[in-house]
Image: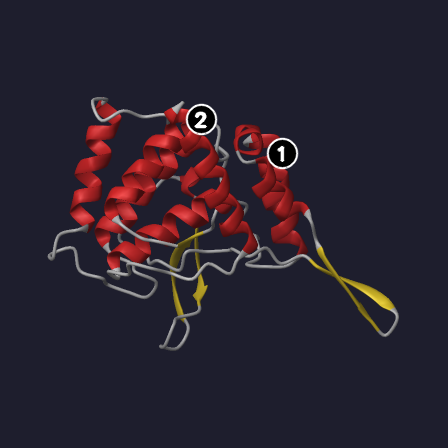
């Protein structure tokens, strides 16, 4: 997929039905512009920077306001993967953020389709979603309980595992937008997209964009 600051801004307009003249969009642009500045240094793995974290917290607040993410606290004993994580994410989509399902039904369908394989004549169900945490370090960032943060061991790209506060993704939209911001921070202009969920939400956002044009 092609990566550009201009395209990300268009995606935000489409998702939230925003216009450049609104007060919210002006605040968004101020926060977005910060991540393009040289002094907003990458401070950790996965394209993490102060500006990137502040931007995504701002966007996630709007997601919650629009019903695209749950307005509840993260349960303390959440696991990073597996059935408990899967059940919690799906339940939150169904009962706490149904607008996400309405807006991105096929992306939701990919999440609820569990991967089943056969081993020694028995069906093995894989409950792992294609997303879990963003891996950014929010330890010194101000956040709310609805931001789904947890202090935990976080796998690094090249360094040993580190313990800090990181964010659990609400859903594939949260995953996609965070991933996009990280690519902008890394100055990536083109990225491979193998994940079915990411491919689907990109497709559904494109459909929303066409509807908006018409």
Residue at 50% of width from left, 50% of height from top? Answer: 199
Residue 113 locus on image (x, y percent): 69, 49
- Residue 105, compared with residue 120, is above or below; it is above
Mark 2: which secondary structure?
helix
Question: Of the residues tagged 1 and 2, which is closer to the observer?
Answer: 2
Depth order, front residue of 159/198: 198
Residue 59 locus on image (x, y percent): 34, 37
For marks 1 and 2, give the CA distance: 25 Å
Depth order, front residue of 136/207: 207
Q: Which residue is mark 1?
A: 94
Residue at 67% of width from left, 55% of height from top? Answer: 83
Depth order, front residue of 80/55: 55
> Within the image, what quadrant is residue 161 found in?
bottom left
Q: Residues within 10 Å of mark 1 (few under 14, many from 20)?
A: some
Residue at 46% of width from left, 56% of height from top? Answer: 133
Relative placement, left or right, of 153 versus 116 is left
Q: Which residue is mark 2?
A: 211
Quadrant location, the C terminus: top left
Q: Can you see residue 9? A: yes
> Within the image, what quadrant is residue 212 found in?
top left
Cβ–Cβ below 8 Å for labels 1 and 2? no
Depth order, front residue of 20/53: 20
- Residue 125, compared with residue 24, is above or below; it is below
């Amino acid at each position: 997929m092609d990566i550009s600051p201009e395209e990300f801004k268009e995606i935000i307009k489409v998702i939230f039905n925003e216009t450049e003249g609104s007060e919210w969009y002006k605040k968004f642009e101020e926060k977005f512009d910060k991540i393009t500045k040289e002094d907003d240094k990458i401070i950790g793995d996965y394209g993490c920077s102060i500006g990137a974290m502040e931007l995504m917290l701002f966007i996630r607040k709007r997601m919650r306001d629009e019903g695209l993410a749950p307005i509840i606290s993260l349960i303390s004993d959440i696991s990073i993967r597996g059935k408990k994580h899967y059940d919690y994410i799906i339940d939150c989509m169904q009962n706490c953020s149904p607008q996400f399902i309405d807006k991105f039904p096929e992306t939701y369908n990919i999440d609820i389709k569990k991967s089943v394989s056969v081993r020694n004549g028995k069906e093995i169900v894989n409950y792992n979603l294609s997303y879990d945490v963003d891996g950014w370090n929010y330890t010194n960032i101000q956040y709310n309980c609805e931001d789904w943060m947890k202090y935990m061991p976080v796998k690094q790209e090249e360094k040993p595992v580190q313990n800090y506060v990181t964010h659990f993704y609400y859903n594939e939209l949260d995953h996609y937008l965070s991933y996009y911001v990280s690519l902008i921070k890394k100055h990536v202009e083109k990225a491979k997209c193998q994940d079915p969920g990411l491919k689907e939400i990109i497709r559904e956002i494109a459909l929303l964009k066409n509807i908006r044009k018409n």
